[in-house]
Image: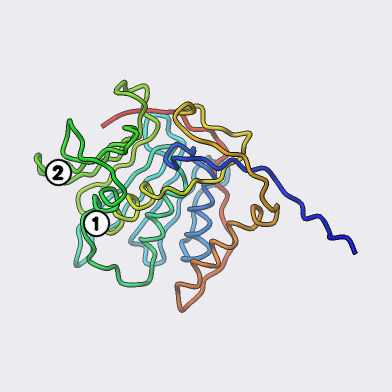
Amino acid sequence: MSRIHEPSVEQALVRPRYLAGPGDPAWVTAALHRASGWSYGHDPLLARVVLASPDQQALLHLEPEPDQPWWVIRHARTAGTPAWQASFGARTPAEIIAAFTDALTDPATPSAGGSPYEPLRDVGWQPARDHSGFTSPDGIVQVEHFTETGSGTWFIDVAIGGDPVGLIWRAQFGAGTPAHLISAVTRALADPSPLPRDPERSPPLGHDRMHTSIRELPAADVAFALERRIDALISRSPVPCRSAAPPGPAVQPRPHRSR
């Protein structure tokens, strides 16, 4: 008996992952809505997604603003922590943003942990020459914590060269952002594994600095990757939550730089 041929699709596996491009925003939005019960109240006629946590303490905005960060997460002040805000640029890989939101919604009590620099130091990132942070081995990523001015803000800049036009994406974490959430992002940055992308949607910036291999993967694995992710997140909680996922905007980002 001949074996039934399993359909496959081409996928580009991109390294380093911080150059992979934005990917699918549903990796973040669908997971928050369906696995963690975040509600949505956006107008379907606008290119905007707004999600609120079940306790109404946290709010995520995803909006295509050319001169502003596309992703903004705000958290209200609580009895134990001040209000804080985190933002990510348009070309930030969704998987890196998801590292932040997965840590935010994890029902387990976060461990005290160490400095967000530790995951970078552990894989060979070096102290930056021109500031107090850390730089990726290829010189593309700069991670810096501003403490001298008293702001306490963290910046992650992914850029080709020193020219502002070369900025690919930026993440910013305001004072008060819990350290374990920033550490989740630095761990995602330091992860050497590639990110899968559609071969027809290659990122235009940083193309000559990335390594891409084309693989044939089972079509079912690609089609149900998001469902498997949501199931894994649901399994973290003793009270599963499922509902329909909101659509993400189908617009292409443009680079910007502002601090």
SS under mark 2 = loop
Residue 255 in which image quadrant: top left
Is residue 32 or residue 218 the one in the foreground?
A: 218
Of residues 16 and 205, the one nearer the viewer is 16
Image coordinates for residue 143, horizontal then vertical, percent: 26, 41
Of 41 and 23, nearer the camera is 23
Q: In the current view of this chain or complex, which residue is farthest to the front?
A: 1
Q: Which residue is found at the position 50% from the left and 59% from the top? A: 31
- Ranked by sequence position, the earlier of labels 1 and 2 is 2
Q: Which residue is mark 1?
A: 179
Could you tell me which residue is drawn at 62 percent across and 36 percent down? 199
Instruction: Locate residue 254, reporting x and y percent.
Output: 46, 28
Q: Residue extending furthest bottom? A: 238
Left or right relative to 216: residue 71:
left
Q: Which coloring applies here? A: rainbow
In percent of width and height, residue 220 lies at: 69, 56
Give the amino acid at mark 2. Ser
Vertical arrangement, residue 26 with respect to residue 66, above or below: below
Residue type at the position of mark 1: Ala
Residue closest to the eye, 140 or 26:
140
Against 33, residue 208 (above or below) is: above
Relative to 53, residue 206 above or below: above
Disc 1 is placed on an element classified as: helix
Give the alpha-carbon distance from disc 1 to disc 2, as whole Å: 15 Å
Q: Quadrant of the C terminus?
A: top left
Callout 1 touching callout 2 (CB < 8 Å) = no
Q: Which quadrant holds residue 69?
A: top left
The numbered disc on residue 151 is: 2
